């Protein structure tokens, strides 16, 4: 059965595979952060009490965190977006300057802030997995390494929590961005305003341009 035609005023932003990758990763990161809060905050720990279960859920949420991303590499669209996120151009440097001065900004499919967020979070999660493994399997390294791993793991968890909360705050303020992750499509006007270079790459169908 052929897919229904997209509405002329909408642009395909994310495929179904990309949306499920985002949801899967968000679920695992959220699980890791919530279980970490219950493990480290006594007030929350007393509400559950089953520390061993929390530790197990936390460990497996952390170790499986790369799974959605790795599985998503079979998607050509996802690989293309990873390439976009890892490539900074002249307009991205201009975006940072404009953001600091609260001026209009030019962006492609992802703006410089989104690229920085994705790269910092990816690097932080890799470090969290590495330090978490040292804590999970203490015989892998000497005591000094494990002590350092615990210190890095704990403080980096706070940074990740702050990044994720900031990400959620930005999403709450932008209904069309949420729509893009929910349905895969965004209004052309929104794309033209927030991501003009990307909107230019996706011209409207000829029928939609006719007066």
Image (tube, rainbow, N blue to C red):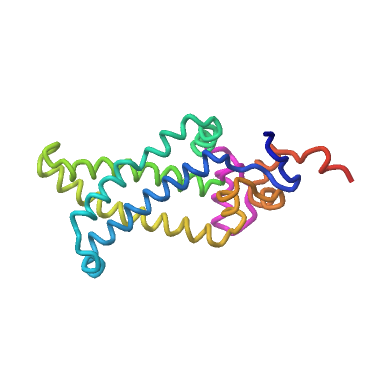
Q: Residue at position x 45%, y 45% from top?
A: 118
Image quarter in which the N terminus is found: top right
Using the image as rendered, state which of residue 153 and residue 76 is in the foreground.
Answer: 76
Choose top left, top right, bottom left or bottom right for residue 142: top left
Q: Is residue 13 magenta?
A: no
Q: Residue at position x 42%, y 55% from top?
A: 164
Is 140 displayed left or right of 47 in the figure? left
Percent across and percent down for residue 84 are 54, 36
Is 69 displayed left or right of 139 in the figure? right
Question: What residue span does the magenta drawing correspond to?
Answer: 88-110
Is 6 displayed left or right of 32 in the figure? right
Which residue of the protein is positioned furthest toward the front in this rendering?
1
Choose top left, top right, bottom left or bottom right for residue 210: top right
Percent across and percent down for residue 22 are 47, 45
Percent across and percent down for residue 207 are 83, 40
Using the image as rendered, state which of residue 170 and residue 90 is in the foreground.
Answer: 170
Q: Residue at position x 56%, y 51% from top?
A: 182
Percent across and percent down for residue 41 are 24, 65
The answer to whether residue 53 is above or below residue 202 is below
Image label count? 0
Which residue of the protein is positioned furthest toward the bottom in this rendering?
43
Q: Is residue 95 magenta?
A: yes
């Amino acid at each position: 059965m052929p897919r229904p035609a997209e509405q002329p005023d909408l642009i395909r932003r994310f495929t179904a595979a990309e949306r499920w990758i985002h949801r899967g990763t968000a679920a695992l990161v959220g699980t890791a952060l919530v279980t970490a809060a219950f493990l480290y905050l006594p007030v929350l720990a007393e509400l559950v009490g089953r520390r061993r279960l929390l530790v197990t859920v936390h460990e497996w949420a952390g170790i499986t965190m790369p799974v959605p991303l790795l599985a998503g590499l079979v998607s050509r669209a996802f690989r293309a977006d990873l390439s976009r996120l890892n490539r900074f151009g002249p307009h991205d440097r201009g975006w940072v300057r404009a953001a600091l001065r609260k001026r209009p900004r030019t962006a492609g499919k992802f703006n410089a802030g989104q690229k920085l967020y994705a790269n910092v979070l990816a690097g932080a999660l890799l470090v969290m997995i590495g330090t978490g493994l040292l804590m999970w399997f203490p015989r892998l390294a000497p005591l000094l390494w494990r002590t350092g791993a615990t210190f890095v793991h704990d403080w980096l968890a706070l940074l990740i929590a702050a990044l994720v909360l900031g990400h959620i705050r930005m999403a709450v303020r932008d209904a069309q961005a949420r729509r893009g992750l929910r349905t895969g499509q965004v209004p052309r006007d929104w794309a033209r305003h927030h991501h003009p270079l990307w909107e230019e790459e996706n011209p409207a169908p000829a029928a939609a341009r006719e007066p």
